[in-house]
Amino acid sequence: MGVVEDCKANMEKRIKSFDNDLLKVRTGRASIAMLDGVRVDYYGAPTPLNQIATLSTPDARTINVTPFEKKLIQDIEKAIMIADLGVTPNNDGHIVRVPIPQLTEERRKDIVKNLKKVAEDAKVGIRQVRRESNDELKKQIKDKKIAEDEGKRLEDLVQKQTDSYIKAIDDRVVKKELEVMKI
């Protein structure tokens, strides 16, 4: 596979990772993705919550966690508290309910600020891929594996890919920011 194809594949991976990060950003609506990072001590092993319970969102402000084994209710509740998501779970002996509080204007602005930091980190990752690809192209030119004109043409392609992926990140951020700021 060529340098440009490798570059595109690596940038695509960075975008997928960024999309996963976006799913975890609170928007004021209940989303089971918020609990993706929660690990529950299950027979001594930290286990993802979605592997020991059914997660659902009966309405826009609540996440229901129904454990496969009732004895896990306390552990699930404790794990959600430890995860420090800004929510307080409660249970009725059968289901753990996680009410999602309304976001204040200040909290929304904090989330947007954090969102922009995550986006900047993703852009840095994209630029890192570009740098690695350009270094590889320069090495190939130096080793006479490709002509200098071809190397410049490929560098231009890498730059165009970089620009398009950076724009994709910016577009996603604008969309998510609108989602967060919408009351």
Image (cartoon, helix red, strand yellow):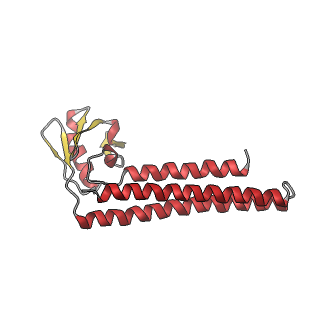
Q: Position of residue 157 (x, y in %)?
A: 69, 55
> Is 61 on the left or on the right of 12, as rendered?
left
* x 50%, y 59%: residue: 122
Q: Quadrant of residue 75?
A: top left
> Is 66 on the left or on the right of 50, as rendered?
left
* x 54%, y 59%: residue: 166
Q: Residue furthest top?
A: 68
> Is 183 on the left or on the right of 150, as rendered?
left
Q: Position of residue 65 (x, y in %)?
A: 24, 39
Q: Position of residue 57 (x, y in %)?
A: 25, 40
* x 40%, y 55%: residue: 175
> Is 17 on the left or on the right of 61, as rendered?
right
- Looking at the image, how many numbered discs can be counted on the residues? 0
Q: Quadrant of residue 68?
A: top left
Q: Considering depth in this image, is 97 or 122 the residue closer to the camera?
A: 122
Q: Quadrant of the C terminus?
A: bottom left
Q: Quadrant of residue 41?
A: top left
Q: Position of residue 12 (x, y in %)?
A: 57, 49
Q: Considering depth in this image, is 46 or 173 the residue closer to the camera?
A: 173
Q: Quadrant of the N terminus?
A: top right
